[in-house]
Image (cartoon, helix red, strand yellow):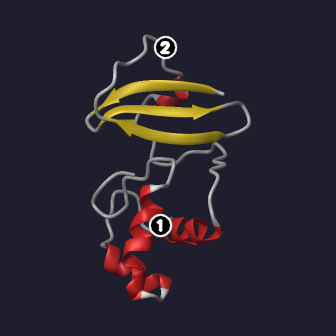
Amino acid sequence: MESVQFKSALGIIEITGDVEDVQAIGIHEEQQIKKQLIPKVLEGSQTTFTFLMNPKETEFQKQIWNILKIIPFGKTLPYLEVTQIYSNTKAGRAIAVAIGKKPYLNCSILSACY
């Protein structure tokens, strides 16, 4: 497993994976960045990506993360709307936890990046 880090306006972004797939993308507020070259595929202003993501999730997390995929790039959606799409407005806390456990960045979620 390899990882790469780079600075962003959100903090230090770290991507972990191998030649098969990406396992996690996360943000670290306070961390020393490792000196390294950033691969060309991570540079620029891409809005779509063609690499395989293979996170480890529960069935519930998978359902919630699939809902998040419908949010257009650069847009946000309140938790209440996610609960309505999931058809259970009382599941707000569980949905928030599932979103918080999402192991890669998706800045189109709920006005914050996870």
Q: Which mark is residue 114?
A: none
Total of numbered circles in the picture? 2
Which of 25 and 107 lies nearest the eye of the viewer?
Answer: 25
Query: Furthest-right residue in view?
Result: 20
Where's residue 3, x and y in %?
55, 26
Q: Amino acid at mark 1?
A: Leu
Q: Amino acid at mark 2?
A: Leu
Residue indicated by mark 2: 37
Where's residue 6, x and y in %?
39, 25
Where's residue 37, x and y in %?
49, 13
Where's residue 29, x and y in %?
29, 34
Q: Earlier in the sequence, mark 1 or mark 2?
A: 2
Disc 1, SS = helix
| Position above or below: 50 against 65 | above
Give yes or no for contact between labels 1 and 2 (Cβ–Cβ under 8 Å): no
Apparent side of residue 71 relative to residue 18 in the rendered image (left or right) = left
Residue indicated by mark 1: 68
Which of 25 and 100 lies nearest the eye of the viewer?
Answer: 100
Q: Residue at x 40, y 58 (%)?
A: 73
| Position above or below: 32 against 83 | above
Quarter assignment of residue 83: bottom left
Q: Residue at x 45, y 28 (%)?
A: 43
Quarter assignment of residue 79: bottom left
Q: Residue at x 47, y 66 (%)?
A: 68
Q: Residues within 10 Å of mark 1 (few under 14, many from 20)?
A: some
Q: Residues within 10 Å of mark 2 (few under 14, many from 20)?
A: few
Q: Residue at x 60, y 66 (%)?
A: 62
Give the position of the N terminus as an image quadrant: top right
CA gap between label 1 and label 2 equals 31 Å
Apparent side of residue 93 relative to residue 56 in the rendered image (left or right) = left
Disc 2, SS = loop
Which of 31 and 84 lies nearest the eye of the viewer?
Answer: 31
